[in-house]
Amino acid sequence: MSAHVLSLVGVRKSFGSEVVLEDISFNVPVHTATVFIGASGSGKSTLLRCINLLDGIDDGVISLDGQSISDPRVNTDEIRRKLGMVFQSFNLFPHMTVMENVTLAPIRVQGLTKSDAEEQAAELLKRFGLLDKAKSYPDRLSGGQQQRVAIIRSLAVRPRLLLLDEITSALDPVLVNEVLSTVRDLKRDGMTMVLATHEMGFAKQVADEVCFLHKGRIVEWGSPEQVIDSPRDPRTQDFLKRVHEAGRL
């Protein structure tokens, strides 16, 4: 088993003539949270999609537990069983109850029986205070509750790595904290995570390492105290100044 859950070396991604990611290299040790910050269009979401094999890369290597997963010959379905991804738009199935949403992948992908999947799902829902919503449909939940269900659904497959893409951006500010509280609990429990967020206060709370991404390149990398509180690069300083003025710091 590799010392790092995730490793990227020289990753490059472009869409046509537009280079979206350039020379991206970093490691994510087990039980740590790596947080990517940066302006819209900096490449954060594309990076997470590349890690989850939703987008292919043009160059470089992405490895999970020491195994290259960017090789086009790999079984993407098998790799994705080890990855959980939560999007900003929830992506719950509207015609399924909360319980059905959470148990779908364990039954279809992992081969669990319905009773075993429901028992596991009930434990997760109880842990995050949503067991009473098990029979509810997504449209009967608040935005915060829907996002927490989306996180629980990702946890139901017991992922090696959890990817979280701007999971609070579609939420009313009042609902943001209940979602962030769920992620803080996961951090405390040792879940290995890679997150993209615009919530700097949250980044400081959960991140072991923070990366500032600017126009597809890693500009600054270090502890939250170094990158957010005492940034060295003028581009990081300018970004954080604008975030502060917007009231997100």
Image (cartoon, rainbow, N blue to C red):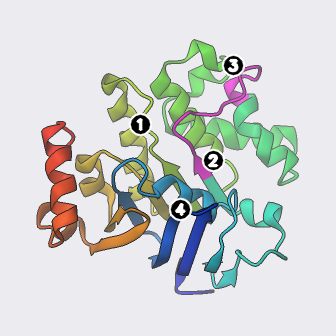
Label 4 belongs to which residue?
47
Neighbourhood count class around disc 1 (C-alpha, 10 Å): few under 14, some 14–19, many 20 upward? many
- Which element is circle 1 on? loop
Residue 168: mark in rendering: 1
**Percent coordinates x, y for residue 30 in the rendering:** 49, 74
Amino acid type, callout 1: Thr
Q: Quadrant of the C terminus?
A: top left
- Which element is circle 2 on? helix
The reply to whether the C-beta atoms of the residues labelled 3 and 1 are less than 8 Å apart is: no
**What distance separates the C-alpha of mark 3 from that of mark 1?**
24 Å
Residue 132: mark in rendering: none
The reply to whether the C-beta atoms of the residues labelled 2 and 4 are less than 8 Å apart is: no
Viewer-closest of 95 and 220: 220
Marked residue nearer the N-terminal end (3 or 1): 3
User: Which of pointers 2 and 4 indicates the residue nearer the eye?
Assistant: 4
Residue 154: mark in rendering: 2
Marked residue nearer the N-terminal end (3 or 2): 3
**Percent coordinates x, y for residue 216 in the rendering:** 44, 65
Amino acid type, callout 4: Leu
Which residue is at 41% across, 37% downward? 168
Give the dominant element type of the magenta stretch: helix, strand or loop.
loop
**What distance separates the C-alpha of mark 2 from that of mark 1?**
16 Å
Viewer-closest of 146 and 49: 49
Q: Magenta span has 52?
A: no
**What distance separates the C-alpha of mark 3 from that of mark 2?**
18 Å
- Which element is circle 4 on? helix
